[in-house]
């Protein structure tokens, strides 16, 4: 059962990376094809010469897009003189010439008349390159936005899967607590006594500080960068409503970056090391929990160590999948401001007799954890979590006391 679960997790990770990579490539290709190269042309055109031109013909053409939609293209042919030569061009704006909105095309050509003289913009180095309206196609924003969202989702999926694979799952090795949990999971859902001799256990942290910080930095930088890139496109066309809407996403990315900075500072906090006098824990059993810190423990002003039992329930409500967590047990083991007791010590911990052991299923789980909370002045606090496994007592009562 455990092997099947690991194989399923590996297959899920592989498909997650594959889907994320696909969305990222499609989104990036769409961004480049629909916006970026035209945006570069638009930027270069800021230094182009303003040249008088005469409009020769004006029309709005219609064409079917694969039989699914009608596209409208404003076609304005104009002529101008540059470097003693006459040139003819029909580039109206930067980007795709067509638009799915007929009114947009009609309004775009409404300011011009056949035979009228207007200013056009001509490249100084390449006189044949010109544009009549120096702006990006306003109708290309929505399609570009969809590609940008696809790229953002793909980036987050891809980096999330890789971060989980490299850091959170600790590929290639298992911690003592993970080995103990896999050994105890006899039926794949409810851990029971293995019958092996008991021994002390170094409890591993549930999350890596560096992994959390790296994941937040990657997600924050990618998300904020993409949102700023999207906003820049609308800013050039003075589309203020999409800009205001996108500013919320930019602020969300900035909030992630702030939290990433906070998590980075937490990496330099003293690292707690916890040890249990017993590897196999049961409801009603007692064990000695000892602790010490690696790093400058003198910075810690107040230490709390708490034993918690957490119930997690997943259910479907309408079309949404919801997950709720609530503590069903909480016991404070240490609450001290004494430098000697903060630096290292031990306490006898009694597991409650009438309680739920560790359990995992598809929609329900009961997990046990030890939280270490250390308050540091003018610096992010220590907030580390250590998962433990509480085994189900055997039917003969062994281990229950």
Image (tube, rainbow, N blue to C red):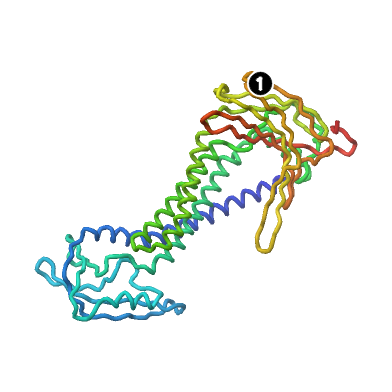
2 relative to 150 in the view: left or right: right
Q: Residue at x 66, y 51 (%)?
A: 8
Q: Which sits in the foreground, 114 or 245? A: 245
In the displayed structure, 115 sits above or below 341; it is below
Q: Residue at x 62, y 48 (%)?
A: 10
Quarter assignment of residue 207: top right
In the displayed structure, 361 sits above or below 281; it is below
List x then y, in percent, for residue 291: 66, 25
Q: Quadrant of the C terminus?
A: top right
Outermost top residue = 340
Q: Residue at x 39, y 62 (%)?
A: 240
390 relative to 29 in the view: left or right: right
In the displayed structure, 172 sits above or below 251; it is above
**How many marks do you count on the picture?**
1
List x then y, in percent, for residue 298: 56, 21
Quarter assignment of residue 78: bottom left
Judged from the image, the secondary structure of the residue bearing numbered disc 1 is: helix
Q: Residues within 10 Å of mark 1 (few under 14, many from 20)?
A: some
Outermost right residue = 396
List x then y, in percent, for residue 187: 78, 45
Q: Give the residue number, with chain letter if any, for mark 1.
A: 341
List x then y, in percent, for residue 317: 69, 60
89 relative to 204 in the view: left or right: left
């Amino acid at each position: 059962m455990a092997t099947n679960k690991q194989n399923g997790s590996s297959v899920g990770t592989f498909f997650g990376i594959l889907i994320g990579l696909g969305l990222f490539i499609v989104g990036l290709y769409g961004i480049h094809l629909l916006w970026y190269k035209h945006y570069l042309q638009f930027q270069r055109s800021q230094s182009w010469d303003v040249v008088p031109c005469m409009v020769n013909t004006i029309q709005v053409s219609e064409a079917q897009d694969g039989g699914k939609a009608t596209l409208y293209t404003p076609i304005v042919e104009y002529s101008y003189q540059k470097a003693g030569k006459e040139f003819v061009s029909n580039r109206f704006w930067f980007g795709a010439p067509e638009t799915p909105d007929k009114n947009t095309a009609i309004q775009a050509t409404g300011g011009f008349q056949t035979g009228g003289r207007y200013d056009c913009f001509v490249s100084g180095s390449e006189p044949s390159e010109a544009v009549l309206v120096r702006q990006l196609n306003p109708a290309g924003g929505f399609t570009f936005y969809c590609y940008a969202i696809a790229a953002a989702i793909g980036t987050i999926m891809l980096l999330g899967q890789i971060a989980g694979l490299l850091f959170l799952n600790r590929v290639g090795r298992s911690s003592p607590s993970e080995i103990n949990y896999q050994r105890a999971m006899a039926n794949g859902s409810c851990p029971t006594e293995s019958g092996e001799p008991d021994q002390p256990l170094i409890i591993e942290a549930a999350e890596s500080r560096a992994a959390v910080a790296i994941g937040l930095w990657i997600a924050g930088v990618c998300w904020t960068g993409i949102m700023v890139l999207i906003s820049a496109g609308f800013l050039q066309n003075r589309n203020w409503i999409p800009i205001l809407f996108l500013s919320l996403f930019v602020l969300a990315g900035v909030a992630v970056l702030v939290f990433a900075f906070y998590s980075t500072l937490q990496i330099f906090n003293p690292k707690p090391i916890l040890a249990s006098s017993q590897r196999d824990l049961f409801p009603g059993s007692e064990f000695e929990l000892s602790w010490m810190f690696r790093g400058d423990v003198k910075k810690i002003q107040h230490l709390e160590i708490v034993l918690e039992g957490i119930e997690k329930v997943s259910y479907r409500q309408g079309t949404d999948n919801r997950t709720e967590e609530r503590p069903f047990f909480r016991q404070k083991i240490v609450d001290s401001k004494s430098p000697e007791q903060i630096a290292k010590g031990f306490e006898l911990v009694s597991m409650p007799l009438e309680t739920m052991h560790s359990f995992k299923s598809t929609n329900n789980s009961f997990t046990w954890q030890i939280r270490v909370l250390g308050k540091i002045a003018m610096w992010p606090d220590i907030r580390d979590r250590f998962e433990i496994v509480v085994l189900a007592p055997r039917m003969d009562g062994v281990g229950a006391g």
